[in-house]
Image (cartoon, rainbow, N blue to C red):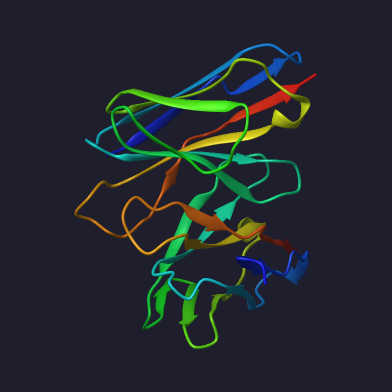
């Protein structure tokens, strides 16, 4: 099983629709989970951390399922500006100065 | 607020030439620093990380090296570049000990093409 696995897409979604991505991870010791957004030829930018209880930030909702080792990202009322690659990220080890393991990303295209 | 700088933004180098990429962070002290590489069509790969001056941990054996001569400066080097070193090099920082959130923030990156 890959460390972090995502459906690469692309997901072609009409503007205003709701879209959801899942991501699975293999390291049960991972403690921190994130979604990053990466625009073409740009650096990844932190979209949101994912907390055990789930969390919401505006149109974005993240969920964590430790038992099944997956995290999800839901985008409501999608905008053209949401078009990007969304990277699922988990920390590599259990603590200290931690590297992050990145999925290869899910490519989202919002169509007008 | 914290900012992270990388330079150069783009670089074209011949095989066998040396490399030096620099990263600096402003607005924070004692950050953890990281170098990642993203090859075309692939995910980000952690190359090195550092928890303090002179402290470097390598994740992937290769012809690259890293150094941290100052608290907020991180340098990626190579004596002789290979074609396979082409990619998008990203420096990142995270808060040091005491804040265990592990969130990392990336610089704008250096796009390296080895010819």
Q: Nearer the viewer, residue A107 or B78?
A: B78
Q: In the rendered image, is residue B86 in sight?
A: no
Camera-nearest residue between A60 and B27: B27
Q: Is residue B38 above or below residue B103?
A: above
Front-lying residue, B10 or A99: A99
Please provide percent x and percent y for residue A5. 66, 68
Which quadrant of the view contains residue A9?
A: bottom right
Q: Is residue B32 left or right of residue A3?
A: left
Which residue extends farthest bottom? Answer: A67
Where does residue A1 sit, x and y in percent of width and height? 67, 72
How many callouts does the rendering have? Answer: 0
Q: From the viewer's perspective, is B52 left or right of B34?
A: left
Position of residue A36 measured from the top left corner of the image (x, y, whole percent) = 52, 57
x, y (%) of residue B88?
Answer: 64, 35
Q: Residue at x 62, y 27 (%)?
A: B63
**From the viewer's perspective, is residue A64 above or below residue B42?**
below
Q: Which quadrant holds residue B39?
A: top right
Residue at image position (63%, 48%) is A39
Picture quarter with the C terminus of chain A: bottom right
Residue furthest out toward the front: B61
A26 left or right, relative to A109: left
User: With respect to residue A83, does B59 lie above or below?
Assistant: above
The answer to which quarter of the image holds residue B111 is top right
């Amino acid at each position: 099983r890959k460390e972090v696995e995502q459906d690469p897409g692309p997901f072609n979604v009409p503007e205003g629709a709701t879209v959801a991505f899942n991501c699975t991870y293999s390291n049960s010791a991972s403690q921190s989970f994130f979604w990053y957004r990466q625009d073409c030829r740009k650096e990844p930018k932190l979209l949101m951390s994912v907390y055990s209880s789930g969390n919401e930030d505006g149109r974005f909702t993240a969920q964590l399922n430790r038992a099944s080792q997956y995290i999800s990202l839901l985008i409501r009322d999608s905008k053209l500006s949401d078009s990007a690659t969304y990277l699922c990220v988990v920390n590599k080890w259990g603590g200290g100065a931690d590297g992050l393991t990145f999925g290869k990303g899910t490519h989202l295209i919002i169509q007008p | 607020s914290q900012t992270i700088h990388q330079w150069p933004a783009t670089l074209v180098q011949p095989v066998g030439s040396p490399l030096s990429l620099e990263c600096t962070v402003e607005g924070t002290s004692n950050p953890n620093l990281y170098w990642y590489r993203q090859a075309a069509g692939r995910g980000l790969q952690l190359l090195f990380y550092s928890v303090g001056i002179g402290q470097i941990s390598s994740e992937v054996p290769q012809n690259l090296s890293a150094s941290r001569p100052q608290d907020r400066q991180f340098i990626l080097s190579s004596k002789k570049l290979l074609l396979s070193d082409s990619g998008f090099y990203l420096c990142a920082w995270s808060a040091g000990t005491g804040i265990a959130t592990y969130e990392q923030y990336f610089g704008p990156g250096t796009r390296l093409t080895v010819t």
